Image (cartoon, rainbow, N blue to C red):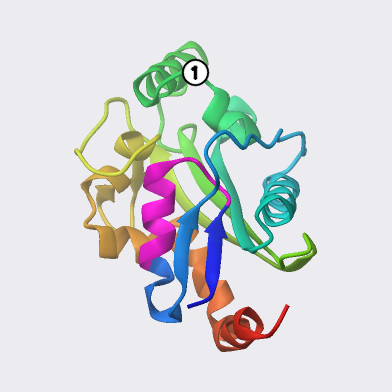
Amino acid sequence: MPTLVIASGNAGKVREFAALLADLGLEIRPQPEGLEVEETGSSFAANARLKAEAVARATGCWALADDSGLSVEALGGAPGVQSARYADTDAARIARLLRELEAANATSPQARSAHFTAALALADPSGQVVLEVEGICAGTILEAPRGEGGFGYDPVFYVPEAGLTFAEMPHSQKAALGHRGRAFAALQPQLQQLRQLFQAPG
């Protein structure tokens, strides 16, 4: 079975990838413990490329990376590429986000409008990026968390078309509507071709 390494140490993210890739017939592995890739890119796409290239070279396997994050209108697009580094824990990240929105006097839904972006990059075992796609999910930031599921900013990210936060959605609904799911939908037309690439000799 061909191996695909997910360029992440985030267990929640690896689980989401594994579910979205379940039909491809691949062995999904997380990146090696202790491997750290410095995310120095100025965009989600640039960071996804950096991670995919580094993990593919380190493992000699195909590697799929995403860089994803939350951009909030009233905060000038912050936290953006700093989403994961906004604070030390999910709870602290949410608390900081809500504090900064309060400080910005962002009380209307328009001022609290936000979007999640997921940029995916696939690198071959030599570290060459062969495919890139991006998905975006628009929503608003609630004043208090709702829901028990998901991770990261999910409890405060409300999706109007669903009437739910990411943390309130069943996995299947988040996979369909979420930024990562939309990125995979953009990838979908090429999945059969990717399967052939994975199985091709080195």
Q: Which residues are magenta?
A: 7-19
For the C terminus, the image quarter is bottom right
Which corner quadrant of the image does residue 12 belong to? top left
Spot occupied by residue 104 in the image (x, y as percentages of width and height): 52, 16
Of 91 and 39, nearer the camera is 39
Q: Amino acid at mark 1?
A: Ala
Spot occupied by residue 55 in the image (x, y as percentages of width and height): 67, 50
Give the main secondary structure of the magenta stretch: helix
Q: Residue at x 34, y 39 (%)?
A: 151
Q: Which residue is mark 1?
A: 87
Q: Secondary structure at mark 1?
A: loop
Q: Is residue 139 magenta?
A: no
Which corner quadrant of the image does residue 158 belong to? top left
Q: Is residue 31 above or below residue 112?
A: below
- 10 Å crowding of disc 1: few (<14), some (14-19), many (20+): some
Q: Residue at x 39, y 44 (%)?
A: 11
